[in-house]
Every structure is written in C-alpha cells, then in structure tokens.
Amino acid sequence: MAHAALPPDRRDHADRLIGWLLGDARAIPDPNDILTGLCERLLEAGFPVDRATSAIQVLNSETLGVARVWDRDTGARVLTLDYSRDAEKVLAASPFRRAHETGEWVSLWLPDTPDDAFAVVPDLKADGIQHYVCVPVKFINGMENAFSFATKHAVGFTDEDLALLGTIMPALGSLMEILALHRILNEVVRIYVGDEPRQRILAGDVHRGEVTHIDSAILFADMRGFTSLSMDLSAEEVTGLLNRYYDCIVPHVEAHGGEVLKFIGDGVLAVFREGAGEEPTCARSLEAARASLRAVGEANGAGDGAISFDVGIGLHLGEAAYGNVGSGQRLDFTVIGRDVNIASRIADLCGSLDEKLLVSMAFVQEYGETGFRDLGAYELKGVSEKQTVFAAKA
C-alpha cells in the first residue's frame, strides 16, 4: 500500500516509535504491555487508534493461534484459537486471511462494508468503529501473522495516519517476529522434552555427556498388552489409542505437581520433586497414580465403542538422571539411571501379579506402611538384587 509523505513532526514521532520498538520494548516481558505501550505512543503521535490486535500463529499442541486485543477503554486481553474442526472456518472468515492471500493491507470503511464481508464486521460496527485496517506480517520461516488497527474517529484514518503506520511497520513486524520465535522455540522444546529439560537445553546444556540428577518419586505407567492390542490396528487407530491412554495419565501427573520427562513407546515416565507442592512427594505421586487409574476406568466404561486397555503403574523413590546422549550433532535428551529402571520393572510386574499399582520398598519406607500389602521380593530384569514390592489400593 502506497502512503503519503510524513510531515516533520510526525516523522519525529515515527522515529521515536521505531527506536522504542527495537530497543526498550524488546525487554518488556508481557506482550500485553508491549501492545499497550505501542497504542499509547500511537495516540501521542496523533494516530486515533481505539482498538488494536496482534495475531500470531503458534507451534503448540493445543493452540493454533494467539491474539492480543487492546481497547482504549478496557486495555489489553488475550484470546486463543484452539485446534478444532471450526478453526479453519474462523480463519477463512477473517480479514487476516484476505491480507495474506493478497499480500496487501485490508482497509474497511465500516459504514460502506456489508455485515457478511467478514465475521468481525458486525462486532466492529456495534462498537462504533468507522475505519479498520489489517496489515499482514510474514515471518522469515513462512508463518503468517498480522496486526489490525481500528478507529471510531468520524473521518477514519487519514493518509498521514496510514503513512505513520506504514513507516513503523517494518520495526513492529521485526519485534513481533523476535518475540514470537522466542516463544515458539520455548514451546516446541517444552512439548518434546518437558519443562525442566527445556530450561537446561535453552540455557546451553547441549553437549554430549552432560547429566542432571533429580531426587524424586518416580512414576512409570505402562499399557498392558499394547503390542497385541495394536497389531491389527491402522496407524491412525494406534495413535488414537495412545492419545486416549496418555490423556488418562498426563493431566493427573501435572495436576499433582509432577512432570512427564519421557514417553517411551507406551510407557510414561514422570517425576515428582520435593518442594513442588504442599503435600509430600510420595503422597502426590500416589494420588496422581490413583487418579490416573480412575481415569482409565472411566475411559473404558464410556461406552463409545473405543478399544479398552489396562494400565500398570510402578512407583519408586530414588534418583532420575537425564542428559545428552548420541553422536556428532544428533543427540537425544533422555532419562537414565538405576532407579528409573527399577520403577519401569515394577510397572512390568503389574501384569504378572495382576495388580494395577505397585510400589517399592524405598517408597513405602518414605510414605509409611499403612495401606500397602507386602507381596514379597522379586527379581527384576537388569537389577542385580531382588526388590520387595508392595501392592497399593488403586
């Protein structure tokens, strides 16, 4: 979009805005505060903004995009677009889609715009908006994002207003990209390795052989008979089965202050650290295990025709170690250690002992013996000495 030349006074405002966007704004931790600061400075520059929105794609397992909306009367708020069957319909009815399809600004003079032009038009009119502008912002990685600005001013945005906006957009787009890619990096690493490993990886722990030790309660959940269950299923059906299973375990681990460190096939490895909740570590892990098994029962009893599955959970108290293993530039951030193996092997025993929840001697000694049944000592694969295990009421 071509813009009028800026007069000297507005050029000064534009220069100050650009300096702020590429300087102090980058250090503001809350994006809502950045959007608020931008709009306040635009108003000082004579740009009559009443509503502004930043919309970005995100790489998140549950969310498609995030919008931050600033209103002159109510301030800034966050809206999310979750993955769903309707998400594409929402995007298709948005000026953002038109802006990226054409590569041009979308400018709407609301008094002359039909209500069905875009889904947002009726809301804009109801709010008294006269003029609306949507500006596409494309990141270097191809992600499509946008800003929009709206005014209630009777004459809308003038040519000089749009020229001011056009002058600062390269700096505003650059700031948006810096912040968005930083968020994406954090979220993608967290999705695939967990929160604690994410922090360590992004802090520079990316060299082979670096190991972190965690004293904690260790939970290992395992789906019984997964191989036989999955043999006659399609890849899509296996994925659906695993996701139903994970949905029974992961939310309850996190709700009780635990952290999932690794998905190992159909196994879930989680730790519960000291100080991560008000209750003692062993109590939180035991509550998470019991809640997970109740969720499995509810999933199997839903009557929706889905495949039923059984789960065995082992609990142990000890040390989990995780770090970088691999070769050259291909590493894996994995979990290792004797106590992790013990937790895994105790979970394996659930099938042969026909129990849903087993715990180790170390766990019982820390938690207390009340409520557990001593099942005796067993040889565990890969563990040199026999381990005494106890059954816990699921």
Image (spheres, grey):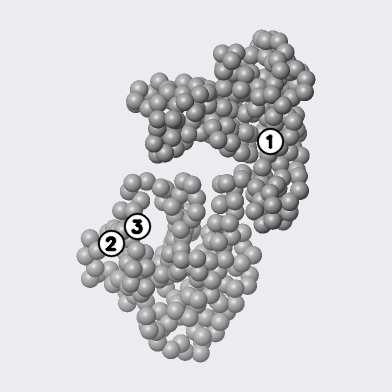
Disc 2 is placed on an element classified as: loop
Dot 1 surroundings within 10 Å: few (below 14), some, or many (20 or more)?
some
Vertical placement of residue 59 versus 169, above or below: above
Residue pictured at 78% horizontal, 20% vertical: 385
Kindly identify which residue carries mark 3. Answer: 91
Is residue 152 visible in the rendered structure shown here? no
Residues at marks 3 and 1, CA–CA distance in whole angstroms:
39 Å
Residues at marks 3 and 2, CA–CA distance in whole angstroms:
10 Å
Disc 1 is placed on an element classified as: loop
Residues at marks 2 and 1, CA–CA distance in whole angstroms:
47 Å
Kindly identify which residue carries mark 2. Answer: 118
The spot of residue 203 in percent (x, y) is 71, 55
Identify the amino acid type marked 3.
Answer: Leu
Q: Earlier in the sequence, mark 3 or mark 2?
A: 3
Residue pictured at 70% horizontal, 48% vertical: 324
Is residue 183 visible in the rendered structure shown here? yes
